[in-house]
Image: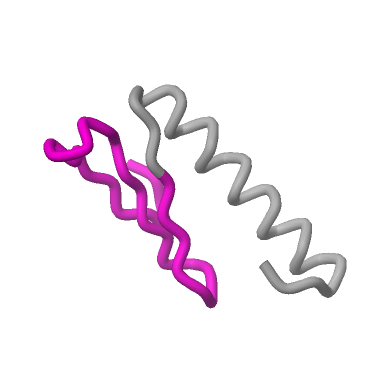
């Protein structure tokens, strides 16, 4: 489980899709493998938390 995300398998696109609900603007990530999606989610989380610390918006 990944807090702040809703993750689903998109059969039509044949990708794993993650929707964030911790960002003020919608953020949707698509990747073909679970590991690639987890890496992108971690990058997004890090970018968002760093942006908030530095006073930037996501």
Image position of 1 (left or right of 39): left
- The residue lying at 35 percent from left, 23 percent from top is 33
Q: Which residue lies furthest to the right in this view?
A: 54
Quarter occupied by residue 52: bottom right
Q: How was the colour assigned to the protein in this rendering?
A: one colour
Can the viewer see residue 45? Answer: yes
Residue nearer the viewer, 32 or 37:
32
- The residue lying at 80 percent from left, 71 percent from top is 56
Q: Is residue 19 magenta?
A: yes
Q: Does the magenta stretch include residue 22?
A: yes
Range covered by the magenta-colored residues: 1-29
Can the viewer see residue 4? Answer: no
> Which corner quadrant holds the N terminus?
top left
In the rendered view, tell whether residue 21 sits above or below residue 41: below
> Which corner quadrant holds the C terminus?
bottom right
Which percent across, then down, holds residue 35? 42, 22
Residue nearer the viewer, 54 or 9:
9
**Count of marks, rendered view:** 0
Q: Which residue lies furthest to the left in this view?
A: 11
Which percent across, then down, holds residue 40? 53, 37
In the rendered view, tell whether residue 6 sits above or below residue 2: below
Which percent across, then down, holds residue 13? 22, 37
- The residue lying at 12 percent from left, 36 percent from top is 11
Image position of 12 (left or right of 57): left
């Amino acid at each position: 489980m990944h807090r702040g995300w809703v993750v689903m398998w998109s059969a039509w696109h044949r990708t794993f899709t993650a929707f964030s609900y911790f960002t003020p603007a919608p953020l949707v990530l698509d990747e073909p493998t679970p590991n690639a999606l987890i890496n992108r989610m971690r990058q997004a989380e890090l970018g968002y938390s760093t942006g908030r610390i530095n006073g930037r918006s996501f």
